[in-house]
Amino acid sequence: MKMLETIKQKYQQLQSNNGSSVLTPIEQNAFKAFDSMGLPTVRNEEWKYTRISSVFNKEYAFNPESIVSNFTSKDLEAVRLPGHEEANELFFINGIYSTAYSTVRSGALVIQSLEEASQNNFKEIVRQNLGHSSKYIQDGIHALNTAFLQEGVFIHVKKGQVVEQPIYIYQIIDARSVNILSQPRLLIHVAENAQVEFVETYVTLGLSESFTNEVTEVVVEKDAIVEYYKIQNDAAHSNQVNTTHFRQVGKSVVHTVAISLNGGIVRNNLNIVMEAEHSEADLHGLYFLRGHTHVDNHTIVDNVKPHSLSNELYKGIIDDNATAVFNGKIFVQKDAQKTNAFQSNKNILLSENATVNTKPQLEIFADDVKCSHGCTIGQLDDEALFYLRSRGISEKAAESLLVHAFAIDVLNHIKSEPIRNYVDQLITDRLDVEFV
């Protein structure tokens, strides 16, 4: 593929321009891995149902600064989330963090480049945690992101601080003139006894193709609480591979909700590694798909230490010719006695052409645990539809009520009221029905 040659040329150019850097050895090892593994194919069990190689049949521009400079405040106003007036807003344009458009309102946050953090008082945090996700995600796409760390960003939440204002992360692609390959990289460190809420959203401007290859690694220290909400409602010509990797190194709480509504090919990798006793994690996801959208959710919960608790619920609503994949893995290591881990994936097919492939998995190496997993695939309940129709509700309205009721279990786990109402409205707009 010609695009692979372009990637190699760009990598060599960046390496020659950067000179010696603390990050250079990491990039070099990652590029060797990418060059060796190449792009994942359906022969790779983890990519059995997602053909990502087709995305690379096109030519992409790498983070062109000329496009970033064409941005205006008017462009950004159209993509802001509700409550942005009081939020910390971090804008990534074509994968590059924009200080010009970002606003940091909280004194509890430190935001700097990965390069800077790797050489100052955060260098030990960077050394111990940058690239930890590669132990769980071993494919060429992940290695490709790591090979281009130059524009990576480090976010530190100070010890004992409660970040009153949420952190909104906007991943914006400006594809108004050329196809764009964007590779955001974030390392987030939530210090001891800190509390923070993240909301991440994705927007593509323009009609050209885009591919976002993102890796976010989050380190959670003792007694910290992290909420992370992800909203994927992008254009049909936008594709994405997204890895979000949590490492609970101290007793802590992680709460995640992923909402996937629109896009081309979307692959979400969510890892939660529970390395401290008495840690808790909640994983919730909703994918409501139409058209030809393909969403692939891969989750890993790795219970390393005893007395951990995890609850996972992913729900899917698939219509038209859309396809969905769910692969959830729970590992309970030998020393992780007294673990409680629960996983459920439930799906509704609204069309004869809709497809879902689901594979919940448990691998238990301890003998004193409580674990369960399961999945369901079905259609709307005929009896419930008949009941609503008998009350004078139209067929379309009845179907919409049942779909919304199915989705509400996940929506209620969005603790932020402005964001929950925003997502609820997106679902309502998609149902597009008058109750008569």
Image (spheres, helix red, strand yellow):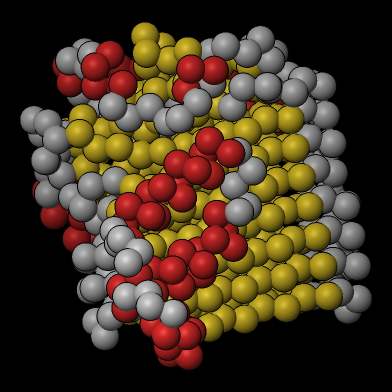
- Residues 246 and 398: in front is 398
Q: Quadrant of residue 343 in the image?
A: bottom right
Q: What x and y, as percent, mark residue 53?
A: 24, 60
- Residues 107 and 319: in front is 319
Residue 210 falls left or right of residue 372: left
Q: Residue at x 8, y 30 (%)?
A: 177
Task: Name, please, the residue furthest toward the front.
Answer: 392
Q: What x and y, as percent, mark residue 342?
A: 72, 70
User: In the displayed structure, would residue 281 be above or below residue 293?
Assistant: above
User: In the displayed structure, would residue 287 be above or below residue 250?
Assistant: below
Q: Residue at x 21, y 43 (%)?
A: 210
Residue 259 falls left or right of residue 414: left
Residue 406 falls left or right of residue 110: left
Q: Quadrant of the C terminus?
A: bottom left
Question: Is residue 351 in sight in this rendering?
Answer: yes
Q: What x and y, as percent, mark residue 122?
A: 67, 19
Q: Quadrant of residue 123 in the image?
A: top right
